[in-house]
Amino acid sequence: MADGFEQMWSDLAPVGRSAATGGYFRQPWDSAEEELRAWFAEQAAARGLVLETDALGNQVAWWRPEPVPGQTEILGVLTGSHLDSVLDGGAYDGPLGVVSAFAAVDRLRERGVEPGRAIGISAFREEEGSRFGLACLGSRLASGSVAWADVEGLRDRKGVALGDVTGEPDAGAGGVLADVGCFVELHVEQGRALVDRGAPVGLASGIWPHGRWRFDFTGRADHAGTTRMEDRADPMLTYAMTVLAANKQARLTTGSTDGEGRATFGRVDVRPNGTNAVPSAVTAWLDARADSDEALQAMVAAIERQAGDRAGRDRTEVVVTAESVSGPVEFSPDLAARINAGRDWPVLPTQAGHDAGILSAAGHPSAMLFVRNPTGVSHSPAESAEMADCLAGVEALADALTELAG
């Protein structure tokens, strides 16, 4: 029998971990992520699962039941998550769902469950968008939500194009989802709702609409010492005011279940990036989220309007480009009811994007299980989960797979 959850988790713990911060750097097509992909293949082989991989590198390992003569084949149940991380991220976001999926299959076999439909374990590539900027890139391509022609030119921070690293002339939809009837993703909770409710496991009701917008501020480079303040066209001033505007507009967004939207400038590029020079350009990326499309659009429009007003006073310019926008997702009420029958797990919305949201929007009924996060911190080295809660999550996922595929 392949290793249990605790051994698998221990094996993955050192991969891509920074000795300086304790955080993880598992970006797509780097050595750490390639090691994780090899680990996935080894785990699939150890269990006799059939591994499928598409041109982008999305992996699905299938446990297929013996065919019954005369019986029509039923589309399978897919579980799993992703193995990549944000820059300096936590250990649990993504890998918890993959490790739990292998452990759940082990539990089904220990219980003597013979699935009536295939069970697949997935590891989608570039879920975080930390390298090429488009979140859930792997599941978007696999589901046909985006076309290869529209993304092959995406470039990372070093200017390398996606099409160059894949080595494929067309890494579009490759058929790994052709046999999928529904999807159940287990994920560490990225908040404190389960802590507040005293529950180790919960279910997601849906995902807030969210997106990423690029703000390009341009001005005039000049000398930091000799240029009078009133003579400057400093895009950093416009950017700084826009950050404050984003914070204000998010707090003013009303109608949300928890009273406010979300707006974050977490990435910035300054040129020429010199200590003694007024910058000529600042590029910054806004991550914005709200509980409705209307609230999200209104919030981003208000931020853009205030940025433009400030640019006029600073003698600078600002151009805003939507790089990726995802609408609201409601997960399948039927799947949730079947998974939650007799358990009464808390049901809560999530403000984070997930592969489950992409598959749901593409027509694959989906559900999500959350495992309690004691601090609520995520996308950080401080992200955590107790082992007892992780094991409860494995049992919950095994129960869900038994219900849906047994």
Image (cartoon, rainbow, N blue to C red):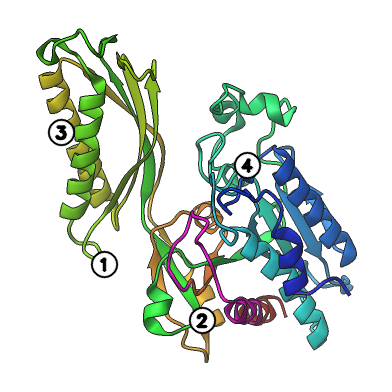
Q: Residue 146, how many percent across, how many down?
A: 54, 37
- Residue 95, horizontal then vertical, whole percent: 64, 60
Residue 48 visible in the shown view: no
Residue at 55% from the left image edge and 57% from the top image edge? 90
Furthest toward the bottom, the residue is 342
- Range of residues picked out in magenta: 374-395
Residue at the image point whose x is 74% and y is 40% from the top: 31
Q: Earlier in the sequence, mark 3 or mark 2?
A: 2
The span from disc 3 to disc 4 (Cα, nearest Å) is 34 Å
Q: Is residue 399 left or right of residue 283?
A: right
Which of the two discs, 2 and 1, sits closer to the camera?
2
Q: Amino acid at mark 2?
A: Pro
Kind of residue sitting beneath label 1? Thr
Residue that badge 1 annotates: 257
Alpha carbon separation for disc pair 3 and 2: 42 Å
The residue to which callout 4 is attached is 27
State if disc 2 and disc 4 touch (CB < 8 Å): no
| Residue type for callout 3 | Gln
* Residue 329 visible from this viewpoint: yes
Amino acid type at image mark 4 = Gln
Label ID, residue 306: 3
Label 1: few (<14), some (14–19) or many (≥20) C-alpha neighbours in 10 Å: few
Structural crowding at the residue carrying mark 3, measured as other residues with C-alpha within 10 Å and reported as few (<14), some (14–19) or many (≥20): some
